[in-house]
Image (cartoon, helix red, strand yellow):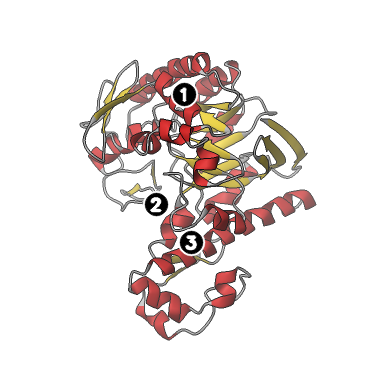
Amino acid sequence: MEFNIIKKSKKSRARLGLLNTDHGVVETPALVTVATQASIKTLTSEEAESVGSQLLIANTFHLHLRPGENIVKNAGGIHKFMNWNRPLMTDSGGFQVFSLGFGSDLNIGKSVKKNSNLIAMPAHAGRVGQSKEVIKEGSNPKNVKITDDGVYFSSPIDGRKLFIGPKESVRIQESLGADIIFSFDECPPPLASKAYIAQSLNKTNRWAEICIKTKKSKQALFGIVQGSRFKDLREQSAKYTNSLGFDGFGIGGDFGKDKKETSDIILWSTKYLDPKKPRHMLGIGHPEDIENVIKNGIDTFDCTVPTHYARRGIAFLDDKGKRLDLRKSKFLKDQKPLDPKCSCNVCRSYRRSYLCHLIKANEITGMHLLTLHNLYFFNSYIAGIREKIKRGTI
């Protein structure tokens, strides 16, 4: 993998780059489309590419459960397995330490919204809980056991016990064969005390060393910066991660209560990272967040929002968060295109009335069409931001 920065903004920390891999080039900044189980839900790989997706990220934990990394390897690797001929990432399994652990125990997501006593949930969940520290140093979730060596899980499929540590994560990812893989980490919960976050960060740092020593493949390995909302821990993590010689960096964990705090966390994290290497933000990407993270120097970011919302009948219309909820019966009488300003095939060919009918009837075709539109919208919007950086307006 090679990363070339072709322009830096004079108005922000935004930058244009070319991420070169054995499976092609990615123009950055770019959305990384989520393909959890080697599939973009409701789409074929060819359809994902047709709406502008350049780079996918698949889930190491779930592919380990099924079909198993050896099945994928024997099929020629994940690119051939899913017929995706462009660049691809796999995560480390670190997010499942959170989602199947404290996230499941407390029904919380990765961040706490400002001016609210509610937890900001990931795209696949609702919102519950109170914004106060409840996880102290030495705590362990009910269904996941986090140790110094790695993490013991119970399979959400059949309940069988399994262990993933840094060595196991790297070996699974090597068998899967993505272009870019990530160091195994603990994605800590947002309601944790500073003492817990520091304890978690020590594990992530030790695991990062082991990941580097374990990797035998030519895949690019990204290290992950953690530290939650604490400036000193973010900076400590960034300095240490940078010192290990990773090919690029992921920024993970809690991204704060609002855009200002997100910007601070990115700055604390990137200040001490090699500026010549790519920076990936793990698990962010609502339309209203995207320009902010790009202006703060992020090159790639992944999020389930465009695909997840589509399967629930939500179409995105602009970067300010305007959405169309096609579950509402009023759209059954609406003969306008989904988005009159959009040039995707869905908006050129289908009316809101029909799409509303499909969603209310729970037809897969409706989910399919909205997924195509949402990914087209996201990728086109980000392509527009790349053009603005080229012109010097961002």
Residue ID for mark 3: 371
Q: Decide which of tag 2 and tag 3 comes sooner along the chain.
A: 2
54 versus 158 height, above or below: below
Report the front residue among 80 and 156: 80
Query: Which residue is located at x 62 percent, y 28 percent?
Result: 271
Please name the residue that numbered disc 2 is placed on: 123
Residue 76: % across, % down: 52, 35
Q: Which quadrant would the N terminus be assigned to in this image?
A: top right
**In this rendering, the label closer to the viewer, 2 or 1:** 1
| In this view, 62 is above or below 347 | above
Within-10-Å neighbours for mark 3: few <14, some 14–19, many 20+? many
> Label 3 amino acid?
Thr
Locate residue 190 relative to residue 154 in the image: left or right.
right
Residue type, mark 1 in image: Val
Q: At 56% across and 77% down in the image, what residue appears?
A: 349
In the image, residue 211 lies at what x, y percent? Answer: 48, 19
Q: Is residue 253 above or below residue 170?
A: below
